[in-house]
Amino acid sequence: MILSDKLILQEIEKGTIVIEPYDRKYLGTNSYDVHLGKYLATYKDRELDARKHNEVVHFEIPEEGFLLQPNTLYLGVTEEYTETHAHVPFLEGKSSTGRLGIDIHATAGKGDVGFCNTWTLEISCAQPVRIYAGMPIGQLIYFVVEGEVENLYNHKQNAKYTGRTAKPVESMMWKNSF
């Protein structure tokens, strides 16, 4: 079951969903719109290795926007910091974003119960497109979890993406054993 706007508001009042900054006008029928933060990042190396720490270069989106190029992965970040303590959050692109040929995540649209952070976006585009800090970029939807959760994400020893970040976070795949 996906939470409706009324249920999202109830969960915000209970503190099981936190959105900062929050503005009621971004609450849809069953989702909350999130916005592109002011930082992007690209990997330093064109060839990436899943077993090593691939470093990124962060940069601020200028006032006049930034022109995304095809065949390049950009890491972005949401303006909104979120906490989800009792539901599974999903981040999806807005249809207006998709109609510009922008994908906001390659695979990581689902958060875990206990995820507390901004959302790193895995941005790619079909053709050159100019983007701007603060533009609507996606929407969060919340699913009900059946049963008690034993390991909240923010309490897991091996959680790699915890702690409040203002900039996009690169892949931490290299921390896995394989």
Image (tube, rainbow, N blue to C red):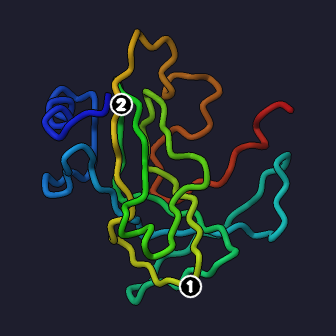
Callout 2 crowding tier (Cα within 10 Å): few <14, some 14–19, many ≥20: some
Mark 1 is on which residue type?
Pro
- Residue 74 lies, in percent from the top left, at 60, 68
Q: Is residue 73 left or right of residue 61?
A: right
Q: Is residue 82 left or right of residue 31?
A: right
- Residue 109 lies, in percent from the top left, at 51, 46
Q: Quadrant of residue 33?
A: bottom left
Nearer the observer, 4 or 60: 4
Residue position for label 2: 143
Nearer the observer, 121 or 101: 101
Mark 2 is on which residue type?
Phe
Nearer the observer, 143 or 65: 143
| Residue occupying the point 14% across, 30% down | 10
| Residue occupying the point 68% across, 50% down | 171
Q: Secondary structure at mark 1?
A: loop
Please state, as top left, top right, bottom left or bottom right, where the N terminus lies in the image. top left
Please state, as top left, top right, bottom left or bottom right, where the C terminus lies in the image. top right
Alpha carbons under labels 1 and 2: distance apart: 34 Å
Nearer the observer, 104 or 60: 104
In this rendering, is residue 42 above or below 67?
above
Q: Secondary structure at mark 2?
A: strand
| Residue occupying the point 56% across, 65% down | 123
| Residue occupying the point 42% across, 41% down | 90
In this rendering, is residue 78 above or below 114?
below
Callout 1 crowding tier (Cα within 10 Å): few <14, some 14–19, many ≥20: some
Q: Is residue 95 left or right of residue 10?
A: right
Residue position for label 1: 128
